[in-house]
């Protein structure tokens, strides 16, 4: 049940937002600018790549890894294989997760690691595997975390994650002294800016011992292990090895949802890198346009903007009591739609189904005629509206990253939904680059998920 009156009460929203979710969403543009500066200070623009990598492997906990891999794959458009290294473990806790490189990974491959934590024991083990195989390694993580130290010792490139400008993270955790530096997003730590060693080239021969893969035991022992293999736990860590969440994150964000501020802080340095490699076009001017687009969306979707002119609040209100069928058209729209479905589940506790057009018409067509159809189970006037919850009815949420063309399935999707009395919500970005389209779709969807979470009576 959604309390729609809360959506137009900014003070009440602020009181309900005890986790700083709206603030984390609103600072996305600032995080893009800070992350771009960190990438420049880390030396990414001065790299001299020797061609493209054979494949890009992405690792990270929760949405930090999955969303980063999904968006990079969408933005590169298949110019280079981008795959996610999914974690394994007995629980979704940072200390329990482990990552394993594919057996065929080698010196011509690039490993990207994105994490808002940096204390996961499994990631340094992954760095060790990559070092043995000769892979090039780039990581975005909090400065001075165990992961960044492991990457530097393996002759990889570690970029400090741009922290929230509103508060220093880990203020009561293990990185008290470093927190102010990371939070300022201006001055990375001395000695941490050039960890690559001589000859580091994305897509070229890696820093490992030879061209062939070596056995990966994950034990950190043996003559081929890098210097970090016997890395001791960082002093001051909690018992789980997991630092406290910074302001603007959701509980468990390191293994669950990553809000836009966090997501863009991790993604931006990697965009600078893949631009340098030649996989996409993301020069500084393009990233500034992305930051500007995120700022404009934050202005349109802010808590002070009324629901009738606020696309995120409007979408949240439309999804009250609905089963969202998220239909996407376009690679970027597909990545944004999958992220939206994940956030609806993680933040708002709402189920959602996502599929790409035109296949979505067949995959979800039966839902438009069954118990979830818009005309199914008409409202009974004598139903107890207090004790009996309203039945879920399907609502199509159409994500598109380009205008409708003659080859678009969007008109057919719209006609099919309306023919079965199923309402349709549509998200289409304004004109601009693929990066700007991704920024706008992600930002509106993330604001909508946050509003749905804050205004849901059962979660307030």
Image (cartoon, rainbow, N blue to C red):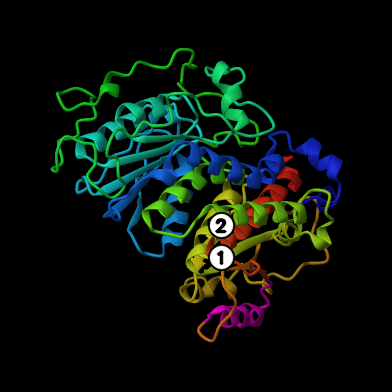
**Residue displayed at 49% across by 66% down:** 355
Q: How many marks?
A: 2
Is 410 contained in the magenta span? yes
Q: Quadrant of the C terminus?
A: top right
Say above or below: 355 vs 303: below
Look at the image and tell me whether residue 348 can be seen: no
Q: Position of residue 416 (x, y in %)?
A: 59, 81
Look at the image and tell me whether residue 213 can be seen: yes
The answer to whether mark 2 and mark 1 are in CB contact below 8 A is yes
Reading the chain from its start, which is encountered first: label 2 or label 1? 2
Q: Locate residue 70: give its quadrant.
A: bottom left
**Residue displayed at 78% across by 67% down:** 380
Is 321 contained in the magenta span? no
Q: Label 1 belongs to which residue?
A: 433
Q: Position of residue 227 (x, y in %)?
A: 26, 22
- Specify start and end residues of the magenta stretch as a single range: 408-424
Q: Is residue 314 left or right of residue 162?
A: right
Q: Label 2 belongs to which residue?
A: 286
Q: Is residue 452 left or right of residue 36?
A: right
Element type at marker 2? helix
Element type at marker 1? loop
Foreground of the two, 170 or 286: 286
Foreground of the two, 402 or 423: 402
Mark 2 or 1: the one toward you: 2
Q: Locate residue 325: give its quadrant.
A: bottom right
Q: Is residue 218 left or right of residue 368?
A: left
Foreground of the two, 406 or 359: 406
Q: Which mark is residue 137?
A: none
Q: Position of residue 169 (x, y in %)?
A: 60, 26
């Amino acid at each position: 049940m959604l309390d729609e009156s809360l959506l137009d009460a900014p003070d009440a929203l602020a009181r309900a937002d005890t986790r700083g979710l709206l603030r984390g969403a609103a600072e996305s543009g600032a995080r893009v600018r800070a992350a771009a500066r960190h990438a420049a200070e880390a030396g990414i623009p001065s790299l001299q790549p020797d061609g493209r990598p054979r494949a890009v492997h992405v690792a990270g906990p929760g949405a930090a890894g999955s969303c980063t891999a999904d968006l990079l794959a969408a933005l590169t458009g298949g110019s280079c294989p981008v795959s996610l290294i999914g974690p394994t473990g007995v629980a979704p806790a940072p200390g329990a997760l482990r990552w394993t490189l594919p057996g065929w990974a080698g010196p011509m491959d690039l490993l990207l690691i994105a994490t808002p934590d940096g204390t996961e024991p499994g990631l340094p083990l992954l760095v060790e595997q990559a070092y043995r195989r000769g892979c090039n390694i780039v990581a975005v993580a909090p400065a001075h975390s165990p992961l960044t130290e492991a990457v530097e010792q393996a002759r990889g490139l570690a970029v400090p994650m741009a922290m929230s400008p509103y508060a220093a993270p880990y203020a009561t955790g293990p990185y008290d002294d470093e927190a102010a530096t990371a939070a300022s997003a201006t001055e990375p730590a001395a000695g941490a800016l050039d960890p690559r060693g001589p000859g580091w080239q994305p897509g070229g021969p890696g820093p490992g011992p030879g061209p062939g893969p070596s056995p990966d035991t994950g034990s950190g022992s043996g003559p081929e292990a890098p210097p970090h293999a016997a890395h001791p736990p960082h002093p001051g860590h909690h018992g789980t090895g997991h630092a406290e969440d910074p302001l603007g994150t959701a509980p468990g964000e390191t293994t669950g949802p990553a809000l836009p501020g966090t997501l863009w802080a991790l993604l931006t340095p990697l965009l600078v890198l893949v631009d340098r490699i030649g996989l996409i076009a993301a020069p500084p001017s393009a990233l500034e346009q992305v930051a500007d687009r995120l700022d404009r969306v934050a202005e349109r979707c802010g808590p002070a903007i009324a629901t009738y002119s606020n696309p995120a609040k409007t979408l949240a209100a439309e999804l009250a009591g609905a089963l969202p069928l998220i239909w996407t058209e376009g690679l970027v729209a597909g990545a944004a739609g999958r992220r939206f479905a994940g956030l609806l589940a993680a933040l708002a506790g709402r189920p959602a189904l996502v599929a790409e057009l035109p296949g979505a018409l067949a995959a979800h067509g039966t839902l438009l005629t069954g118990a979830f159809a818009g005309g199914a189970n008409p409202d009974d006037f004598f139903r107890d509206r207090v004790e009996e919850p309203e039945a879920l009815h399907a609502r199509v949420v159409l994500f598109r990253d380009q205008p409708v063309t003659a080859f678009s399935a969007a008109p057919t999707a719209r006609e099919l939904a309306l023919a079965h009395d199923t309402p349709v919500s549509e998200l289409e970005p304004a004109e601009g680059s693929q990066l700007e389209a991704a920024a706008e779709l992600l930002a509106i969807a993330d604001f909508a998920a946050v509003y749905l979470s804050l205004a849901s009576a059962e979660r307030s």
